[in-house]
Image (cartoon, coloured by chain):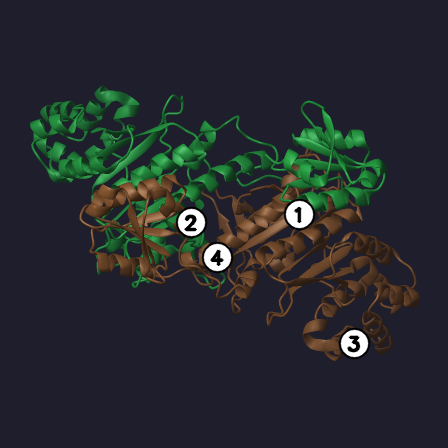
Chain colours: A green, B brown
Amino acid sequence: MELDTAKGMKDIPPEEKILQQGVMDSIRRIFERYGFAPLETPAVERWDVLSAKYAGGAEILKETFKLKDQGGRELGLRYDLTVPLARFVGMNPNLKTPFKRYQIEKVFRDGPIKLGRCREFWQCDADIVGSQKMIADAEVINLILDVFKEIGLKVMVKVNNRKLLNAILSYAGIKREKMEEAIIIIDKLEKIGAEEVGKELEKTEISKESVKKLIWALQLQTLEDMKEIIGGCDGIDELEELFSYVKGKNVFFDATLARGLSYYTGTIFEAFLKDSEITSSVAGGGRYDDLIGNFIGGKRVMPAVGTSFGLNVIMCALKGKERKTNTRVYVIPIGNVKWGLKTAEKLRELGVNADFDLSDRGVTKNLAYASSFEIPYAALVGEKEMKLKKIKIRDMKTGKERLLGIESAARAVKK
Amino acid sequence: MELDTAKGMKDIPPEEKILQQGVMDSIRRIFERYGFAPLETPAVERWDVLSAKYAGGAEILKETFKLKDQGGRELGLRYDLTVPLARFVGMNPNLKTPFKRYQIEKVFRDGPIKLGRCREFWQCDADIVGSQKMIADAEVINLILDVFKEIGLKVMVKVNNRKLLNAILSYAGIKREKMEEAIIIIDKLEKIGAEEVGKELEKTEISKESVKKLIWALQLQTLEDMKEIIGGCDGIDELEELFSYVKGKNVFFDATLARGLSYYTGTIFEAFLKDSEITSSVAGGGRYDDLIGNFIGGKRVMPAVGTSFGLNVIMCALKGKERKTNTRVYVIPIGNVKWGLKTAEKLRELGVNADFDLSDRGVTKNLAYASSFEIPYAALVGEKEMKLKKIKIRDMKTGKERLLGIESAARAVKK
């Protein structure tokens, strides 16, 4: 046996996990603040569900882990949380809408391992199913803004609309059947620049003329300019309504934002860090009015809009903010192990995260142990302290010690 | 495509998930109160790790989901959190001990589907690695007591010791090579009774005489009696020390407690609900001083003691305590959709979980929607309210309405 994790999978040791849990708690808190309800679905799904026509598509299926159960049933590990949501909606026809659900769970992709890209990773999704109104799109964008405020990261959100993108492509003379391909190329604008995108577009037999017109129109900065050049359209109307609802100054129209996924039907958006070297988006999403309806057989119309947070990128942005422990105080008994136990018990009853010597070691070794975990306080309890019904609280950073009653001690070591 | 979950797997819809999250939060809170640190390991492990000699064993391997990645590497879905812990300890030789870690994650078993038994389920584990002292065993038992206090369930904990069990088996004249088999049979005492256990033991070629002696000794109620009959032994010494540390009156010695798993080496314990029809244990665990050391190749001695909480059984015990929503107030704009948005925004800024009409519906439909989710309050905002800078708060149960300023409203709807 080789003592290792599976390729592309990794452990999250305590100091990283503490930070990650803090971030996930923040996300969850704001999801609930906005009225989203939690849903859990299994990591393992039926293969026919994952590979259904309107599910994730051929590309993602190549990266999907496949397995069988003992009965020979074909199964797979989910690659996203959207297909499980569509399945859940389909299986629950009496669901009250709008159905606002969030899901913070792991997904799996057996893909190439780029830097920081894992084959098992967390997704944090929030979706509103059953409203076609722009206020729902605004709700999701405002949610993104508040999540990052809670986490303590400055972001800006770029917004566009697939209907507008289609209108621009029409305006440039690009035919309907070429549009999807063109959108995937436009999506690279930020990364590879206008010139390269132009070259790639020309390769797809779109005329030089069209490419020129397209690139020019994409670089228009405002909805007003857009309206003037390409004329009014649903996409512009929707964006105007949307912008009347979103809060703050950090939401911008960006005609070049395309997002690769083909299932979007209207609003699309992506959040990026401000003042950061990280250029990947930290959240993204959009409106997908057809996906769920198609997925469940076209019997019901099920408009939806949602977002997904990139926990890995967020964790990169928070590098250096790790904390080694949630423990506030480490109790060291001097002489009798029970004194440590009793003191820890009392502190815990008062709501303090307290640990104590479980190895019957000397004071020096115990202090070194507490110090290695960066526990902020030590509590020393010997015969004298037990008689006085006090404990000696040591600030591990300054070395300063104080003799305190249990309740004062609890207050002193709490954050 | 059949719109269904995989066999033996199920969705956890919001109302059940809200309760489950509350329970998991309680467990996590107490784990951290006791100084345990969170660890995350992947759901997918290398097959050679899962099937290693000192891992879960042949029986559990039969129920393990097997898969391959694109590179043809053999992998499996983990069946517990103990093997990943052992692997993690092995891969991190500089880990400071005692290493107190907790892990709340899903595990997978492709086994027969009994009532309420899923092929994918949560495990909540807390383990102390690197202390062979009885105070560590006590810490884990006290942890169990405090977790259930936090959840609000009354439990009792039965405690035994494998060394004592072995001594009892010796006393009854049962040979070393028969002991493991005998322990697995003794484990059924509670379920099938002394007579049936006797019969099963006789089938294994243990003499009638031995069986009689064994059953008799197992029914001794106190450590004092035990010492008198079978003589002193390490197991009794350890139990006596352990009982001097555990708190409360709900921890009992029970010589018949055996626990099936073969890896336990000392203390074993199981928690059961008091005043409940549910007879399955809600938590269990024990000391396993050899498992990790053996698993990582015998280069280091790694004593350990830990516990696992049965989230499914706990959820059964809490049946009827589900809550449909975490939302406190549903905002209904009368006339202008933006009034709803603004009001919800302000309430959220004041820390209130607030939702609002995203479908531009009438008041009656909106009230019915709020009512169907059992949201405790509605906030009605029309032109009059906007002018007065007030909102009308309606108690959804009593129908009573009050006109309040935003801050009073926030206070009124918060729990």
Q: Which residue is mark 4?
A: B19
Q: Earlier in the sequence, mark 2 or mark 4?
A: 4
Tell me the CA gap for discs 1 and 4.
24 Å
| Mark in front: 4 vs 3 | 4
Q: Is residue A243 left or right of residue A387?
A: left
> Is disc 3 in the same subunit as disc 2?
yes
Q: Which residue is mark 2?
A: B414
Tell me the CA gap for discs 4 and 3.
47 Å
**Dots 3, 1 in contact, CB < 8 A:** no
- Please, is residue B153 above or below residue A148 in the view? below
* Residue B362 % position (x, y): 20, 56
Kind of residue indicated by mark 4: Leu
* Residue A101 % position (x, y): 36, 51
Q: Is residue B316 left or right of residue B264?
A: left
- Circle 3 chain: B
Task: Give the class, few, some or many, for how many residues have Cα within 10 Å of label 1's Cα (few <14, many ≥20).
Answer: some
Quadrant assignment for the N terminus of chain A: top right
Q: Earlier in the sequence, mark 4 or mark 3?
A: 4
> Is disc 4 in the same subunit as disc 3?
yes
Tell me the CA gap for discs 1 and 2.
26 Å
- Circle 4 chain: B
**Dots 1, 2 in contact, CB < 8 A:** no
| Mark in front: 1 vs 4 | 1
Examine the image and state in which quarter residue A220 appears.
top left
- Element under label 3? helix
Q: Which residue is mark 1?
A: A349
Tell me the CA gap for discs 3 and 2.
64 Å
| Mark in front: 3 vs 1 | 1
- Element under label 4? helix
Question: Looking at the image, which residue is at 71% across and 54% down?
Answer: B141
Q: Which residue is mark 3?
A: B202
